[in-house]
Image: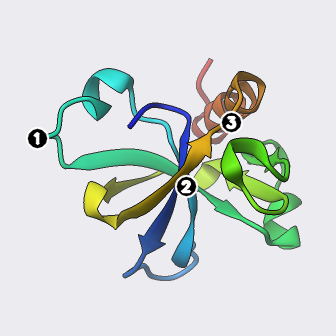
Amino acid sequence: MRRGDLFLAELQPRSGSELQGPRPVVVISRDSFNRVEAWSSVIVVPLSTSERQARRGPTAVPVPDGAGGLRGDGVAVCHQVTTLDRSKLTRRLGALPPEVMKAIEAGIKAAMDLP
């Protein structure tokens, strides 16, 4: 597992306005954590196909059809960064290209007001 990998994950249970159900997520935790098998959690950004989410400004980053094995266009919802147990990652889809990861990193920075 590496930063930038796209996985299908089961996001249950969740509550309120959190994205739920089976959906792609992109791994954003650092590779030194991801390589440690005993480290049972992973930090991810969920993807959505919602047009409403796509209009949320700089924290909603377009991910084009085919990127990282994605089927159809998606939106990385960077204002919903979350930590999951690795057991919730059900299948690796692929890896996002560097330019998409740079855009997601910018979305995370915007969501968290980081320089």
Between residue 55 and residue 63, name the one nearer to us: 63
Q: Which quarter of the figure has residue 4?
A: top right
| Of the pair 65 and 58, the residue shown nearer to us | 65
The three-letter amino acid code for the residue at tag 1 is: Ala
- Circle 3 residues within 10 Å: few <14, some 14–19, many ≥20: many
Q: Which mark is residue 104?
A: 3
The answer to whether residue 9 is visible is yes
* Closest to the observer, 93 or 77: 93
Find numbered disc 3 in the image and state the secondary structure of the residue it sits on: helix
Asked if residue 63 lies left or right of residue 18, the reply is right
Which quadrant of the figure has residue 112? top right
Q: Which residue appears at 37% of the width and 82% of the height?
A: 13
How packed is label 1: few (under 14 Cα within 10 Å), some, or many (20 or more)?
few
Mark pair 1, 3: CA separation: 27 Å
In this rendering, does residue 18 appear at all? no
Which is more N-terminal, label 2 or label 1? 2
Q: Which residue is mark 1?
A: 38
Residue reaching furthest to the left: 38
Are the residues flagged by discs 2 and 3 in contact, CB closer than 8 Å?
A: no
Please report whichever mark, 1 or 3, sits nearer to the chain's N-terminal start. Answer: 1
Between the C-alphas of marks 1 and 2, the distance is 21 Å
In the displayed structure, 3 sits above or below 18; it is above
Q: Which residue is mark 2?
A: 25
